[in-house]
Image (cartoon, grey):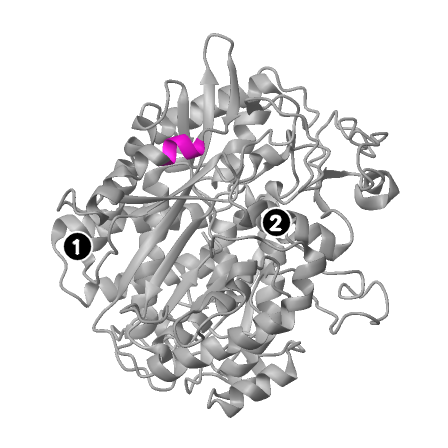
């Protein structure tokens, strides 16, 4: 959940007048934090996960399921223990913290306290996630369920909300979803409307349809109300916004209504945070493909497996000039990506970094860059921040325009929190004991707590391996972008290849595994060489070449003290990921797709009907609760 503030949000026509004010003071706030915290040292790793849930209402008598919009009533119950602890009514800290998300059908759960740096901490993650699921369901009405689905498969289809509302909202002006699906906090309807106002049109989201035997060619969606004339934007679909052979969506809710699995690390210092940011960036598209779990949008099977491009398009506020469709006249930059996309620049000053890795023509605000440099911020970090600040602030609260830049970071976070990238570098909040952090954001929410724990723990272990073995994952940013595009393909985890570095051991390999295994030998030739590798090769290794991420994690675990019980649990997680990478186990997307295509009501026409959706929801809930085995998804592991 990003920045939340209270006050009077400004309409875009007024907000844009204060854009430079927010940018200027945002940089002043960052410089204040940088001066005070740049030498901040923490003793050890702290980290936490964020799991997002879709709340559904199941009616078994009617054999139907709908999205529940009762999240704020549910949150009021879930947050009581946290409030009691904060107000001194109990000395017992909450087991979990609960927050709203963009959608009124979504909740976010995190552990009550950060996890620590021990391997024993890793063994508690799954139990905490299971406890969160039980707590969430206990706060709900009979029939309501918290689901770790990436998205509700029939979001945007008629009569899928509990309660029903017509799609005639002034904020999103969608032909498919009403404003009632949006979090009612003033930030969210304003963010939705101001993206549309700034862009000059509704957002355009088009995901390729999965062409089955009976899917029409070309596919022209019969459920789009082509002739609707309620809003001036209604004509956009017929005028080209809705593409043939694609699933068309027209509102922020389709993207920001998706759920993900995010991990935030507190590093020991700013340099370690920047190093982790850089080396996790090439991992982000790999993990997106491996956690793929979003094959259905607006009641249709898509020919993609992931959510990322849907969200990117759902918050794309760029004007036609910024998208390069018209010559620059009123805007300052041509911007190549949405605000929600992969990173554009590495930021670490570590000796492993080379300028050739930053091979994109980075667009950044040169005046802001010079201001940062004058404030003693180095070149790479100044470029990163000034690149984020080419964007406009989308939500400005009138009461918060004037702030004490030594005590507040609201203006900085206004821009920082609305640049949603695969990895996020997070400065400490002012006047806090929190350190420099990195947020890993690409992974999709998994169907079960076992899977969510496995991927969370794997990323944490990978950060330990990166630092302990001094690993080098740098490849050119352009190849990271290529990998992001590949990750979306249907079945990418088993069918496609990804660019990855061949030699991950730096010249100063302190702590690197040294067990005589030829798989760890440095390749001849260019030390910075990269090549296309299968997911199996990246995760499990090559016979003569890259050792594989999982064997590297195993080497790390073999080098530290760990009790047998913890080691076995960690091994189960690594085994799940290894078997998913080699194709022995399905990704969530492949499994959900199979549930649809094998359903007796499926007509091989790409349509996910209400009956199919009901059975899918019931099946996934049983799997998540351990009531139904899913060997194709989990093997012999228990959910």
- In percent of width and height, residue 259 lies at 48, 43
Q: What stretch is highlighted in magenta?
A: 71-75
- Say if the magenta span includes residue 386: no
Give residue 443's mark: none
Q: What element does badge 1 sit on? A: helix
For mark 1, what is the residue? 120
Q: Is residue 553 left or right of residue 1?
A: left
Image quadrant assignment for residue 227: top right
Image quadrant assignment for residue 481: bottom right
Is 119 above or below relative to 153?
A: below
Is 269 above or below relative to 250?
A: below
For mark 2, what is the residue? 190
- In percent of width and height, residue 507 lies at 38, 86
* Residue 468 in sight: yes
Labels 1 & 2 near each other (Cβ < 8 A) = no
- In percent of width and height, residue 173 lies at 72, 39
Residue at the image point whose x is 34% and y is 52% from the top: 49
Q: In this view, does 385 lie to the left or right of 440?
A: right
Residue density around tag 1, few if under 14, some if 14–19, many if 20 or more, within 10 Å: some
Residue at the image point whose x is 63% and y is 52% from the top: 315
Q: What element does badge 2 sit on? A: helix
Is 374 above or below relative to 281?
A: below
Report the number of numbered marks: 2
């Amino acid at each position: 959940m990003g920045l939340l503030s209270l006050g009077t949000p400004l309409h875009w026509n007024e907000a844009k007048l204060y854009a430079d004010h927010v940018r200027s003071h945002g940089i002043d706030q960052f410089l204040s934090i940088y001066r005070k915290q740049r030498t901040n040292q923490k003793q050890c790793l702290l980290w936490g996960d964020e799991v997002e849930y879709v709340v559904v209402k199941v009616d078994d008598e009617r054999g139907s399921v709908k999205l529940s919009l009762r999240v704020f009533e549910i949150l009021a119950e879930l947050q009581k223990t946290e409030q009691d602890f904060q107000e001194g009514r109990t000395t017992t800290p909450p087991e979990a913290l609960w927050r709203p998300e963009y959608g009124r059908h979504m909740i976010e759960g995190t552990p009550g306290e950060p996890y620590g740096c021990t391997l024993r901490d890793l063994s508690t993650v799954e139990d905490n996630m299971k406890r969160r699921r039980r707590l969430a369901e206990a706060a709900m009405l009979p029939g309501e369920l918290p689901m770790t689905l990436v998205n509700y498969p029939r979001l945007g289809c008629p009569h899928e909300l509990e309660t029903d509302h017509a799609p005639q909202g002034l904020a999103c002006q969608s032909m498919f979803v009403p404003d009632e699906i949006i979090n009612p906090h003033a930030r969210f309807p304003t963010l939705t409307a101001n993206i549309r106002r700034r862009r000059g049109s509704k957002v355009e989201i088009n995901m390729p349809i999965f062409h089955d035997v009976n899917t029409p060619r070309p596919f022209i969606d019969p459920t789009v109300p082509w002739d609707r004339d309620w809003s001036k934007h209604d004509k956009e679909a017929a005028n080209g916004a809705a593409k043939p052979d694609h699933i068309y969506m027209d509102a922020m809710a389709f993207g920001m209504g998706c759920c993900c699995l995010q991990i935030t690390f507190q590093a020991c210092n700013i340099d370690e945070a920047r190093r982790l940011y850089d080396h996790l960036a090439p991992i982000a598209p790999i993990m997106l493909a491996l956690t793929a779990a979003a094959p259905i949008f607006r009641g249709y099977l898509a020919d993609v497996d992931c959510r990322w491009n849907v969200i990117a398009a759902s918050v794309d506020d760029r004007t036609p000039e910024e998208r390069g469709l018209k010559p620059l006249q009123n805007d300052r930059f041509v911007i190549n990506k949405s605000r929600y996309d992969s990173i554009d620049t590495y930021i670490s000053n570590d000796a492993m970094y080379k300028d050739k890795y930053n091979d994109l023509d980075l667009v950044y605000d040169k005046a802001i860059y010079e201001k940062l440099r004058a404030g003693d911020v180095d070149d790479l970090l100044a470029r990163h921040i000034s690149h984020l600040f080419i964007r406009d602030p989308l939500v400005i609260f009138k009461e918060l325009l004037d702030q004490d830049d030594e005590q507040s970071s609201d203006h900085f976070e206004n821009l920082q929190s609305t640049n949603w990238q695969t990895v996020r570098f997070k400065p400490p909040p002012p006047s806090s004991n929190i350190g420099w952090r990195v947020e890993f954001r690409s992974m999709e929410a998994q169907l079960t707590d076992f899977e969510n724990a496995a991927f969370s723990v794997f990323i944490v272990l990978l950060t330990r391996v990166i630092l302990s073995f001094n690993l080098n994952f740098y490849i050119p940013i352009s190849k990271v972008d290529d990998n992001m595009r590949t990750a979306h393909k249907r079945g990418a985890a088993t069918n496609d290849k990804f660019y990855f570095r061949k030699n991950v051991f730096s010249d100063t390999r302190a702590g690197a595994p040294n067990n005589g295994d030829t798989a760890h030998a440095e390749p001849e030739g260019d030390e910075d060489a990269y090549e296309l590798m299968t997911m199996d090769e990246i995760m499990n290794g090559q016979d003569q070449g890259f050792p594989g991420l999982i064997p590297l994690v195993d080497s790390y675990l073999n080098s530290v003290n760990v009790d047998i019980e913890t080691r076995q649990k960690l091994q189960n997680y690594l085994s799940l990921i290894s078997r998913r990478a080699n194709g022995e186990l399905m990704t969530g997307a492949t499994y959900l797709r199979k549930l649809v295509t094998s359903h007796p009501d499926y007509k091989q026409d790409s349509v996910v009907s209400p009956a199919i959706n009901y059975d899918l929801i019931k099946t996934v809930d049983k799997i998540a609760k351990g009531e139904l085995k899913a060997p194709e998804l989990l093997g012999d592991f228990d959910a």
